[in-house]
Image (cartoon, helix red, strand yellow):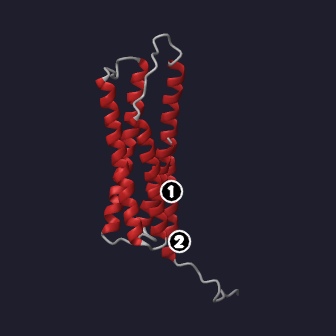
């Protein structure tokens, strides 16, 4: 009979269950992201095909979109720092990072609305031409997913402020899933 030595303890059932939950959550996130890849691949294919038509009119995009890009990149960085801080047990840093990421996500949404207002002020609406239609549809779809990501972030911020442990358990899983989803949105 083989005995287990003191240097190699048997894993606890709770640890194995937690690891399994982590894997299941991450698999679910990646499956959802795969559907988003397919959705945006379809949009991109349609965009490429449609822009060769004779009625395609190029659209001068609002400059605020560059600010929006910077806001999303900064929010992604803040969220990654929050995730790492949470894993290391630095709760106040994790809370600040989560709150910063959520605030920058809200700034992005405000910037999207400002871009739409600028286009509307120029008389550019969804039915104005095919390019404007694609712009509004793609940015609205992206905005909806950012709202979903913000929902996850707000939930994570609430749990973090209510004292949930950030280095293990459900809130750590939530932070990892939120970070994966958010990084994907930023890359998109």
Secondary structure under tag 2 reads helix
Which residue is painted at 44% across and 66% down in the image?
172
- Residue 177 in sight: no
Residue 42 to residue 58: above or below: below
State how many labels appear. Answer: 2
- Confirm or deny contact between disc 2 and disc 1 (CB under 8 A): no
> Where is residue 41 drawn, in percent x and y?
53, 33
Residue closest to the far front: 63
**Residue at the right extreme of this rendering:** 1
Q: Position of residue 82 (x, y in %)?
A: 44, 63
Q: Earlier in the sequence, mark 2 or mark 1?
A: 2
- From the viewer's perspective, is residue 158 above or below residue 15? above
Seen at 54% across and 20% down, the residue is 49
* Residue in the foreground of this view, choosing between 78 and 169: 78
Q: Residue at x 52, y 67 (%)?
A: 19
Q: Is residue 45 left or right of residue 152?
A: right
The residue beneath circle 2 is 16
Along the line of sight, which residue is nearer the eye, 25 or 17?
25
Q: CA distance from mark 2 to mark 1?
A: 15 Å
Find residue 168 and report its image quarter.
bottom left
**The N terminus - image quarter:** bottom right
Query: In front here: 27 or 127?
Result: 127
* Residue 91, position as x, y percentages in the image: 40, 71
- How many C-alpha atoms fall within 10 Å of the one at disc 1: few (<14), some, or many (≥20)? some
Name the residue at 34% across, 23% down: 126
Can you give x and y, in whole percent of width and height, for residue 88 in the image?
49, 72
Local SS, label 1: helix
Please identify, in this view, whether the residue under mark 2 or under mark 1 is nearer the observer.
1
Label 2 CA crowd tier, 10 Å (few <14, some 14–19, many 20+) = few
Is residue 5 visible from the viewing direction of this image? yes
Which residue is the site of mark 1? Answer: 26
């Amino acid at each position: 009979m083989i005995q287990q030595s003191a240097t190699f303890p048997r894993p606890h059932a709770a640890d194995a269950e937690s690891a399994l939950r982590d894997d299941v959550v991450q698999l679910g996130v990646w499956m959802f992201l795969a559907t988003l890849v397919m959705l945006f691949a379809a949009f991109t294919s349609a965009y490429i095909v449609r822009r060769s038509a004779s009625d395609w009119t190029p659209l001068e995009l609002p400059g605020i979109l560059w600010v929006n890009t910077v806001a999303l990149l900064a929010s992604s960085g803040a969220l990654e720092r929050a995730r790492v801080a949470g894993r290391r047990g630095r709760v106040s840093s994790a809370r600040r990072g989560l709150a910063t990421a959520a605030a920058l996500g809200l700034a992005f949404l405000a910037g999207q609305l400002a871009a739409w207002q600028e286009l509307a002020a120029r008389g550019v609406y969804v039915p104005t031409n095919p390019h404007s239609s694609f712009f509004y549809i793609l940015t609205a779809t992206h905005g909806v997913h950012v709202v979903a990501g913000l929902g996850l972030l707000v939930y994570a911020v609430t749990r973090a402020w209510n004292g949930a442990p950030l280095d293990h358990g459900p809130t750590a899983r939530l932070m990892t899933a939120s970070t994966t989803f958010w990084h994907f949105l930023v890359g998109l």
